[in-house]
Image (tube, grey):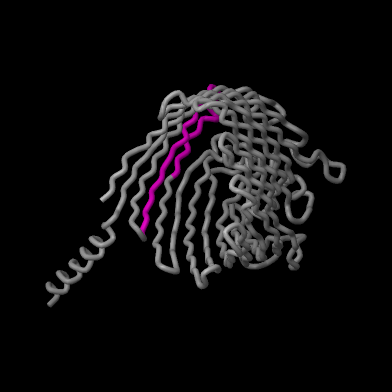
Amino acid sequence: MYHYGKIIFASLVWVMFARVAVGAEWKVAGALDQGVEYDDNIALRPDATPTFGYLLKPRFSADWNTNNIGLGLTGGGDIRRYDDEQWNCDNFSLGANQHYLMKTQNFSVAGGYSQSCSYSQQTSDTGILVPGNQSENYNLAPNWNWQFAPLDKLSLSPTYAQTSYSANGSSNELGSGANFRSNDTYSLNLTETHDWDRRLSSNHSLFFSRSEFSNAGSASSQNMYGFQLGGQYAISRAWSINAGAGGRWVQQPSSINNTLASNSSDSPIFTNVANLGLNYKGQNMDYGFNFSRTVNPSAYGQLLENNSVNMNYSYQISRELAFNFDASLQKNQSIGQSQTQAAQNRTYYSASSGLVWKFSKDWNVSAKYLYRRQEYPDVQGGQAINSLAGAQESNAFMLHLNYNWDGLRVSR
């Protein structure tokens, strides 16, 4: 009987895979980018040190799709070698995704693992660029969508993300008593979307997250919950706009045993979140303007309010030549203003412009100039609070050669 059971089970598995294999498509693709870069202040420090380096960035992707099932795998590397060896860096990432489609529901899950030099990650987080320090990142994001009415959809999205560091930052740089802290973040987002017509849709969502921070000396946690309302509107074939606004209640950090940190209140602090985007996509020109205010975990060991404004512009001069311009402004601010927290407030600017020449189907060469500026507060209560206080600037020049392989595509 057991033998017959195995035969029946194997037959069912074979029938299932034979059915989903009908109409299946495989695709494999890849790319290789290599270049040289010069930066006159890679660390954005008062004692600027010029660096010259070589970069190698391989990438690949593999996808398998049927009418209702899809599987994907992506991977990439970022190898950097500089004349100042302390900035040498080996980054790599690996990601996977899967989706399953039904008539009124679909389920997907995406996950990834990566290792990177913390200085490349901290450019957008704390601005504290420490050489010889690796960050390790895990993430998992399942998602369930239910089309419960012709014009209405419900989405449930739990996520998990973990970031850890091989070493701590300098307390003198980060402010009194602070250093890099690993974090584990669990979040849950429930969203309802309504399509009013082909051009206009609206959404509203509820959100909760818990972040746990730790290093060799301490551990703490911080909870956040809130709501957001938003919508998207296609103004024309070329123009579109999206906007959203809401609120977040952020609890002050507490130790893992649920005791409040010193000088903390048990009353949550309210902060607002918002986003606004305006985009244009024409035949030869693309333009985008985006503003966002979010609250995210940071290597400081607490949640930060992040305000950012981004603008991008690209123009296709000819079939082979294109011009690109990007600019951004980012302000990171602690939620609650102790002296240590005030040392963590930061303003970061960046702007770049460049040309891309596609001289064959798979090959292109690009040249780019990048300007960066970072500002920390000078004093708090009449005392210097940060060794990186003031404004630091950087100028970088880049020349890259890129190969894009369209890959192989097999259908059956």
Tell me what residue is drawn at x 41 percent, y 29 percent. 361
The residue lying furthest to the bottom in this view is 1
| Residue 177 screen position, x and y as percent | 70, 48
Q: In which quarter of the image is residue 174?
A: top right
Bounds of the magenta span?
A: 69-93
The residue lying furthest to the right in this view is 382
The foreground one among 101 and 42 is 101
Q: In this view, does 241 lie above or below 328?
A: below
| Residue 44 screen position, x and y as percent | 67, 32
| Residue 302 appears in the figure | no
Q: Is residue 26 left or right of residue 337?
A: left
The foreground one among 356 and 141 is 356
Q: Is residue 156 above or below residue 51?
A: below
Q: Is residue 283 left or right of residue 249?
A: left
Tell me what residue is drawn at x 67 percent, y 63 percent. 229
Q: Quadrant of residue 98?
A: bottom left
| Residue 292 appears in the figure | yes
Label count reads 0
The foreground one among 144 and 277 is 277
Is residue 230 found inside the magenta-colored segment of the image?
A: no
Tell me what residue is drawn at x 42 percent, y 38 percent. 59
The foreground one among 293 and 390 is 293
| Residue 259 screen position, x and y as percent | 68, 67
Give the dominant element type of the magenta stretch: helix, strand or loop. strand
- Image quarter hosting the N terminus: bottom left
| Residue 89 screen position, x and y as percent | 50, 33
